[in-house]
Amino acid sequence: MKIPKTSRDLPYIEFRIDKKGRMTLKAAAQWYGGIKDGFVCSDGSEGNTCSPKDLEKYIKAFKQNKIKLIEKEIVKLQKKLEKLKV
């Protein structure tokens, strides 16, 4: 994947993962709060921004955080299912 060039006006890289799992990168002016945060768009895509040197680390952390959230959600749903079976 080609990493976009940053500038003084656009110092960050935004990575965005759509509903189908495709990732896009673009230069961005805003930073969204760190390695444990991110954003969710109205179209269902999710992502974060970071400095270019941290891109790989942020993408890896973003995916790991999403996996943890989904695993927690699965546990909650399994508990709800068990309650309904009783």
Image (cartoon, grey):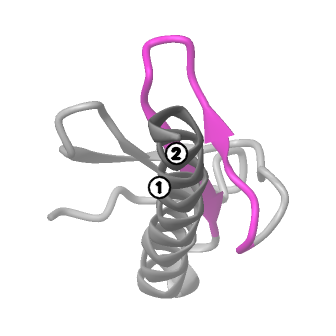
Q: Is residue 46 left or right of residue 40?
A: left
Element under disc 2: helix
Residue under the point 77% across and 52% down: 31
Say which amino acid is labelled 1.
Ile
**Label 2 packing within 10 angstroms: few (<14), some (14-19), many (20+):** few
* Residue 80 figure quarter: top right
Q: Residue at x 60, y 32 (%)?
A: 40
Residue at 45% x, 38% y: name it: 85
Q: Residue furthest front?
A: 86
Which mark is drawn over residue 62? none
Which region is colored magenta?
35-50
Q: Secondary structure at mark 1?
A: helix
The dot on residue 77 is 2
**Along the line of sight, the residue nearer the viewer: 16 or 27:** 16
Q: Within the magenta stretch, is there residue 10?
A: no
Q: Amino acid at mark 2?
A: Leu
Relative vertical location of residue 40 with respect to residue 79 in this rendering, above or below = above
Residue 12 x %, y %? 63, 58
Q: Residue 18: give x, y in percent of width and height.
A: 31, 34
Callout 1: few (<14), some (14-19), or many (20+) C-alpha neighbours within 10 Å?
A: few
Label 1 and label 2: CA atoms lie apart by 5 Å
> Which circle marks residue 74 in the picture?
1
Contact (CB < 8 A) between labels 1 and 2? yes
